[in-house]
Image (tube, grey):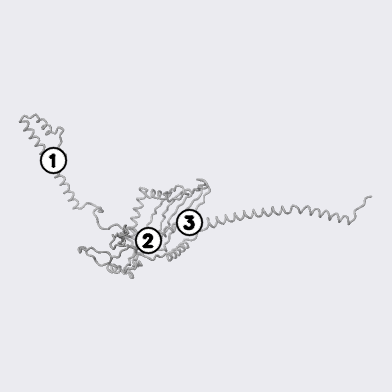
């Protein structure tokens, strides 16, 4: 007969077994917790990288650009603030080497009369132009001339492709970056419409010089061009690190000018006498120095509130291509606006030297005049007279030689044959004889 365990011993056995199971199960818990924390950190890091790349692509590359009105107003405010900071304190006509007209010694001759100096108020009075009451002009006749000039330029560009050759040479010149391969021009469109100039008004402008009566006349007119002028290129971005041609990325870009509007300022800058610096330092303080005169030039610029609307098309990649990336368009627009602002937006101006307008014979074109015909007739008659006189001299010489031969033949001299051969032209030619 077997003895059955009591309740107390059975309870003690169960407690000992549970403690043993709990002791053996707590050993792998730290390893599972560490592996779980590493997995969570790895997944969290990968997720953060994916979120960052997605946000960068969405907001930086494929983000919607601002509206043209907002962009134009922002750029206009930036230009105005920059102009106020960089406002020049001197005039475009002023210079440290400019010699006043009163200091220039006039010619002692009284043949050439020196009229009184014409100031801006005198010019306005003699031309009957009131800057306060005169109505703005339409400039229709000037628009026709500009349109004819642009049309001829477009025709010449299509005939000999000179613009394609020149642009290709400029783009592939020494200023091309090293990370770009050869640039190929793929599209050029010079447009079909013409700029319209209107609302022209003339007003005096103070140059800010210390000399009196230094105001000049300036014409301001509104310019509006709505056209499609396109310029397209394609190239490759080359990565040359750590070794040459590590990676190549094809890029195609096309920029189109859709509209340009602004205010154009035009003024004439008269010729100015400037003192030439002396090469000898000992004579640098001399009162008499040679003077050089700058030619009369035409200065033009645009007001900072101009508007330039562009349409940029881009294509990046060879197999998986990204088309019309907004940030590339924004970078190109900012670069073009900066290029224009640095060259021909007030207070900066562009100066073009004007040629001499004095009429010259070499610049005359058209049918010949009566004076030209008479001069040509007289010249031809003079040449004909000179030829007749030379022919008579040759005939006289030959006649004298023949007479001399006849006298020697009658006297019986043996040299008569020699004079006869000379007289008959047998290999003998009179020096300086002209053809008959």
Separation of residues labelled 2 and 1 (CA atoms): 68 Å
N-term mark: 3 or 2: 3
In terms of depth relative to the viewer, which is nearer, 293 or 429? 293
Q: Secondary structure at mark 3?
A: helix
278 w.r.t. 426: above or below: below
406 w.r.t. 161: above or below: above
Image position, residue 211 (x, y; %): 32, 68
Q: Residue at x 83, y 53 (%)?
A: 17
Outermost left residue? 411
Dot 2 crowding, Cα within 10 Å, few <14, some 14–19, many 20+: some
N-term mark: 1 or 3: 3
Separation of residues labelled 1 and 3 (CA atoms): 82 Å
Separation of residues labelled 3 and 2 (CA atoms): 25 Å
Dot 3 crowding, Cα within 10 Å, few <14, some 14–19, many 20+: few
Image position, residue 168 (x, y; %): 41, 49
Dot 1 crowding, Cα within 10 Å, few <14, some 14–19, many 20+: some
Q: Is residue 31 left or right of residue 236?
A: right
Image position, residue 164 (x, y; %): 39, 49
Q: Is residue 188 left or right of residue 416?
A: right
User: Mark on residue 331?
Assistant: 3
The residue that disc 1 covers is 391
Q: Secondary structure at mark 2?
A: loop
The residue that disc 2 covers is 349
- Of badges 3 and 2, the one in the foreground is 2
Outermost right residue? 1
In terms of depth relative to the viewer, which is nearer, 37 or 252? 37
Q: Is residue 17 left or right of residue 129?
A: right
Q: Quadrant of residue 407?
A: top left
In terms of depth relative to the viewer, which is nearer, 240 or 192? 240
Quarter occupied by the C terminus: top left
Image position, residue 368 (x, y; %): 22, 51
């Amino acid at each position: 007969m077997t003895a059955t365990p009591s309740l107390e011993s059975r309870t003690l056995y169960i407690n000992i077994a549970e403690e043993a199971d709990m002791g053996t199960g707590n050993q792998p818990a730290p390893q599972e917790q560490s592996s779980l924390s590493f997995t969570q950190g790895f997944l969290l890091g990968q997720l953060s990288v994916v979120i960052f790349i997605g946000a960068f692509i969405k907001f930086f590359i494929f983000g919607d650009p601002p509206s043209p009105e907002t962009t134009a107003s922002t750029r206009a405010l930036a230009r105005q603030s920059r102009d106020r900071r960089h406002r020049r304190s001197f005039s475009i006509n002023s210079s440290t080497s400019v010699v006043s007209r009163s200091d220039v010694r006039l010619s002692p001759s009284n043949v050439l009369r020196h009229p009184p100096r014409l100031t801006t108020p005198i010019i306005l009075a003699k031309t009957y132009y009131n800057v306060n009451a005169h109505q703005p002009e339409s400039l229709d006749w000037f628009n026709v001339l500009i349109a004819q000039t642009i049309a001829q330029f477009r025709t010449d560009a299509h005939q000999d492709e000179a613009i394609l050759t020149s642009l290709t040479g400029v783009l592939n010149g020494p200023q091309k970056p090293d990370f770009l391969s050869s640039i190929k021009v793929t599209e050029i469109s010079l447009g079909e419409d013409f700029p319209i100039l209107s609302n022209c008004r003339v007003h005096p402008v103070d140059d800010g010089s210390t000399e009196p009566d230094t105001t000049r006349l300036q014409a301001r007119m509104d310019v509006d061009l709505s056209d499609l002028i396109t310029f397209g290129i394609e190239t490759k971005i080359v990565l040359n690190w750590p070794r040459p041609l590590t990676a190549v990325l094809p890029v195609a870009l096309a920029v189109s000018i859709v509209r340009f509007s602004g205010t154009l300022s035009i003024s004439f800058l008269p010729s100015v006498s400037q003192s030439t610096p002396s090469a000898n330092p000992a004579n640098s303080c001399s009162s008499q120095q040679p003077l050089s005169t700058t030619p009369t030039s035409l200065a033009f610029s645009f007001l900072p509130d101009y508007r330039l609307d562009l349409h940029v098309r881009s294509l990046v990649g060879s197999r998986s291509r990204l088309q019309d990336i907004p940030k590339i368009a924004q970078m190109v627009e900012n670069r073009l606006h900066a290029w224009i602002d640095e060259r021909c937006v007030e207070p900066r101006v562009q100066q073009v030297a004007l040629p001499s307008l004095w009429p010259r014979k070499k610049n005359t074109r058209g049918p010949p005049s009566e004076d030209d015909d008479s001069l040509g007739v007289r010249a031809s008659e003079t040449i004909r007279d000179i030829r007749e006189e030379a022919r008579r001299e040759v005939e006289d010489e030959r006649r004298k030689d023949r007479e001399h031969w006849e006298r020697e033949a009658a006297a019986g001299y043996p040299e008569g044959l020699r004079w006869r051969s000379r007289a008959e032209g047998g290999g003998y030619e009179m020096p300086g004889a002209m053809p008959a």
